Amino acid sequence: MRIAVVGVGNEFRHDDGVGWAVVERLRERAGAGPPSPDTGFATCDGDPGRLIGLWQGAALAVVVDAAHAHPGTPGRVHRLELDAGQLVLPSATSSHGLGLGEAVELAGVLGLLPDRLVVYAVEGADGSFGTGLSPAVADAVEPLVAAVEDELARYRDAAVGRRP
């Protein structure tokens, strides 16, 4: 059972770096406990080919990405799950021109989708050049880290037949 956790974005475009920030925090917390050889943490710029490569062969892939929504609420988190081979997208869209939606579509055609794909999309406030998250998005990082950890724990429990 391989699990891939991928932070998508660009850490040099303020809130677009939220996926990277979440993955970095998850790595720190995972390093404090016993290692989990079944889980890999990675970051990606959103290129569909790279995304597919990162989740290829995974039983579960969890992707964290920044999103634009109109009207938006910076820091609001959307949880999306692959359903019958299609990702149901909310009114928020990825902050990348080609990205997650295209990766899902291409991976589906190529038969390279993970068994289960969960996406956390965080509405951003500032996608301009620079580092650091806006306050609302920064405030969403810790709850999102906890949500991803809970997602992983529920999946592992279900995989071994335990009730969450």
Image (spheres, helix red, strand yellow):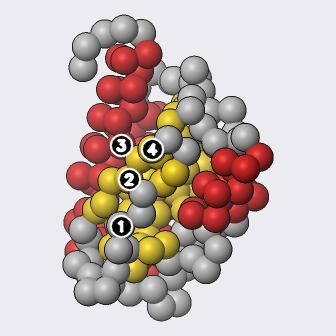
Q: Amino acid at mark 3?
A: Val
At 52% from the left and 90% from the top, the residue drawn is 129
Of label 1 and label 3, which has the lower sequence position?
1
Marks 3, 4: nearer the viewer: 4
Q: CA distance from mark 2 to mark 3?
A: 12 Å
For the residue carrying disc 3, how many other residues have a C-alpha within 10 Å: few (<14), some (14-19), or many (20+)? many
Q: Is residue 153 above or below residue 149?
A: above
Q: Are marks 2 and 4 in contact (CB under 8 Å)?
A: no
Q: Quadrant of residue 122?
A: bottom left
Q: Which residue is mark 4?
A: 83
Q: Quadrant of residue 103?
A: bottom right
Q: Amino acid at mark 4?
A: Asp
At 26% from the left and 77% from the top, the residue drawn is 74
Mark 2: which secondary structure?
Answer: strand
Does residue 109 appear anywhere in the picture? yes
The residue lying furthest to the top in this view is 161
Q: CA distance from mark 1 to mark 3?
A: 19 Å
Q: Which mark is residue 80?
A: 2
Of label 2 and label 3, which has the lower sequence position?
2
Q: Which mark is residue 90?
A: 1
Q: Amino acid at mark 1?
A: Pro
For the residue carrying disc 1, how many other residues have a C-alpha within 10 Å: few (<14), some (14-19), or many (20+)? few
Of label 2 and label 1, which has the lower sequence position?
2
Q: Is residue 126 left or right of residue 140?
A: right
Q: CA distance from mark 2 to mark 4?
A: 9 Å
Q: Residue 55 location, x and y as percent?
A: 64, 43
Q: Nearer the viewer, residue 85 or 35?
A: 85
Q: Are marks 2 and 1 in contact (CB under 8 Å)?
A: yes
Q: CA distance from mark 2 to mark 1?
A: 8 Å
Q: Which residue is mark 3?
A: 148
